[in-house]
């Protein structure tokens, strides 16, 4: 289980996370919803070790992750599909996948995993020699997911995987999220698309201005209320 | 005609040394996207340590090579730790200016170690030149050319075919994503710096073994030649570094023969200027000068 406790993170004087506590249960899909600027990406980047939080703890099982380098955190079995994909634009699709397996030494197994990714994302097989920067947005998102999976993570973090994608591609991404979870991967997902997220999530959190404002399971709150609280802000909506 | 061919041959040989210097420069620039003005001076530190053990302990050629390369690598890592590692990615100018400050510091250090202006440097090969019809080929020049071709092929292989090269290209492509896939970015960058300095150290050794002497001016000379050759060949392109060096060498050799040594250096700057105006990306560079092509799949 991934447990975040009382996490505070700041950019200079601006506190983006003001004491966030939440958990992603092993083997489940946990979803985090919230308006622009709520601090969702800040939280993901802190878990991945890119940002160093001011206070609080992030634990995976018995291991404290705060203070570890991003490379060590990958070694602990966490992989992040970052906001805006961040593929390596001048490298081929295949090289992007190989970079995803950077910490692994088992060449034959890596090659087998590349084939598995191609089976899961047939588009990537067709385009394996193409430079990643020339892929369409949806293809880049598939590649970013596949690249993260190449490290064989126990916990997959995803930051707005549906951003800017057509509805069909979004549905495809969510189908894959469910599939990955069925195969045993713990998933912690940040989304703007509350409708899709609530369909796959076992548990969800709402976040606003650096604080968690709601925690529950999808049936617990009507969808339009979630949307209102997540995107219009609880205070204004509840007022 | 015979003179023309002989000058061209000489130019290619000298150009090979410029190409080697540019190769190390290109590696640093390609990975960091920053100009390391201390590149030549850190090679000079290696050369001074090499000549020190030669003068003091009459060390043999192998020991001098090892000392020169090792010294250049240590000085290179020192520069990286001081000027590049602590600076934020956006602070390119700060890195460049501080690398200039370290240049002055390294020059002073060299003068402290060996205070006379000129010191002897052990020659590489003293045998008679090969004769090819009317043309002469110096053995040490041939070794220089062979080293330039081998090392550039080696660097090309490492960058595009090895796991370490994959990491470097990932860092060039997107440093945050490189962290996210588990690459130890800091260590990789430092190793790239060390590798570039080693290439520079080999280049420096070969040049000085041909000149058979070293002065504190060598640092500035190496930075200038490497920089000009890199700009002509194409910023960030590995074959471009060697080609740029060869073009610079040939043009210099001809102008030296026709107009003498002062004009030779002037012509080198004119060539750089013409190149920057007519083809800012250099001969083999396909990106504008602000970018780099090392990260591309095929250079
Ligand atoms: N590099 C930065 N420097 C300064 N402030 C930042 C930086 N990155 C984010 N912030 C601020 O931190 C707050 C949280 O940003 P964050 O990116 O985590 O939001 P988010 O929930 O991911 O939003 P979105 O849904 O738009 O992606 C915002 O107010 C933002 O302006
Ligand atoms: Mg975000």
Image (spheres, coloured by chain):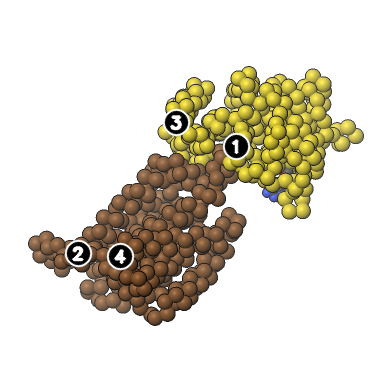
Q: CA distance from mark 3 to mark 4?
A: 43 Å
| Position of residue A208 in the picture relative to residue B43 (left or right) | right
What is the x, y in percent for residue B226? 38, 63
What is the x, y in percent for residue B77? 50, 59
Of residues A149 and B1, the one nearer the viewer is A149
Q: CA distance from mark 1 to mark 2?
A: 54 Å
Q: CA distance from mark 4 to mark 1?
A: 48 Å
Tell me the number on the disc at residue A107.
Answer: 3
Q: CA distance from mark 4 to mark 2?
A: 21 Å
Q: Are marks 1 and 2 in contact (CB under 8 Å)?
A: no
Please tell me whether mark 2 sits on a helix, a strand or a loop.
loop
Q: Are marks 4 and 1 in contact (CB under 8 Å)?
A: no
Q: Colour of chain B?
A: brown
Quarter of the image with the C terminus of chain A is top right
Q: Colour of chain A?
A: yellow
Q: Residues within 10 Å of mark 4 (few under 14, many from 20)?
A: few
Please tell me whether mark 3 sits on a helix, a strand or a loop.
helix
> In terms of sequence position, does the residue under pointer 4 or pointer 2 come before the other?
4
> In terms of sequence position, does the residue under pointer 1 or pointer 3 come before the other?
1
Q: Are marks 2 and 3 in contact (CB under 8 Å)?
A: no
Tell me the number on the disc at residue B60.
Answer: 4
Callout in the foreground (4, 1): 4
Residue depicted at x 47% and y 27% = A109
Asked whether residue A165 appears in the rendered view, the answer is no
**Label 2 chain ID:** B
Q: CA distance from mark 1 to mark 3?
A: 18 Å
Quarter of the image with the N terminus of chain A is top right
**Label 4 chain ID:** B
Residue underneath mark 2: B138
């Amino acid at each position: 289980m991934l447990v975040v406790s009382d996490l505070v993170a700041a950019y200079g004087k601006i506190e983006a996370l003001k004491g966030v506590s939440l958990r992603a249960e092993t083997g489940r899909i946990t979803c985090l919803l919230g308006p622009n600027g709520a601090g969702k990406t800040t939280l993901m980047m802190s878990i991945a070790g890119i940002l160093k939080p001011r206070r609080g703890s992030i634990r995976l099982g018995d291991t404290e992750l705060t203070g570890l380098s991003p490379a060590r955190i990958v070694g602990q079995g966490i992989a992040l599909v970052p906001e805006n994909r961040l593929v390596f634009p001048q490298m081929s699709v295949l090289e992007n996948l190989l970079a995803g397996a950077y910490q692994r030494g088992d060449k034959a197994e890596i090659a087998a995993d590349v084939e598995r990714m191609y089976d899961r994302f047939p588009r990537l097989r067709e385009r394996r020699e193409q430079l990643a920067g020339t892929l369409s947005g949806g293809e880049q998102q598939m590649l970013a997911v596949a690249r993260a999976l190449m490290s064989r993570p126990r916990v997959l973090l995803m930051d707005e995987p549906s951003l800017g994608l057509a509805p069909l591609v979004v549905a495809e991404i969510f189908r894959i999220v469910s599939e990955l979870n069925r195969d045993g991967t713990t998933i912690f997902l940040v989304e703007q698309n509350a409708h899709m997220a609530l369909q796959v999530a076992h548990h969800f959190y709402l976040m606003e201005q650096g604080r968690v404002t709601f925690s529950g399971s999808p049936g617990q709150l009507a969808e339009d209320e979630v949307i209102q609280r997540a995107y219009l802000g609880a205070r204004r909506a509840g007022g | 005609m015979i003179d023309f061919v002989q000058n061209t041959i000489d130019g290619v040989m000298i150009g090979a040394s410029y190409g080697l210097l540019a190769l190390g420069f290109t590696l640093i620039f390609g990975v960091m996207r920053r100009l390391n003005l201390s590149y030549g001076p850190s090679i000079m530190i290696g050369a001074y340590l090499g000549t020190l053990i030669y003068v003091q302990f009459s060390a043999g050629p192998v020991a001098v090579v090892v000392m020169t390369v090792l010294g250049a690598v240590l000085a290179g890592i020192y520069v990286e730790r001081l000027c590049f590692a602590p600076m934020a990615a956006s602070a390119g100018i700060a890195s460049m200016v501080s690398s200039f400050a370290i240049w002055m510091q390294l020059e002073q250090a060299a003068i402290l170690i060996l205070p006379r202006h000129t010191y002897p440097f052990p020659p590489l090969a003293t045998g008679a030149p090969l004769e090819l019809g009317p043309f002469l080929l110096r053995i040490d020049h041939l070794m220089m050319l062979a080293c330039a071709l081998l090392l550039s092929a080696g660097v090309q292989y490492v960058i595009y075919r090895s796991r370490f090269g994959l990491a470097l290209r990932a860092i060039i492509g997107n440093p945050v994503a490189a962290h996210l896939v588990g690459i130890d970015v800091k260590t990789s960058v430092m190793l790239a710096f060390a590798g570039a300095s080693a290439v520079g150290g080999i280049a420096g050794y070969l040049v000085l073994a041909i000149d058979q002497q070293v002065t504190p001016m060598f640092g500035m000379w190496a930075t200038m030649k490497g920089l000009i050759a890199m700009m002509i060949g194409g910023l960030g392109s590995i074959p471009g570094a060697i080609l740029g060096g060869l073009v610079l060498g040939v043009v210099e050799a001809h102008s030296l023969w026709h107009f003498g040594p002062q004009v030779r250096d002037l012509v080198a700057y004119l060539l750089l200027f013409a190149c920057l105006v007519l083809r800012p990306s250099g001969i083999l560079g396909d990106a504008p000068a602000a970018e780099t092509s090392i990260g591309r799949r095929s250079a």
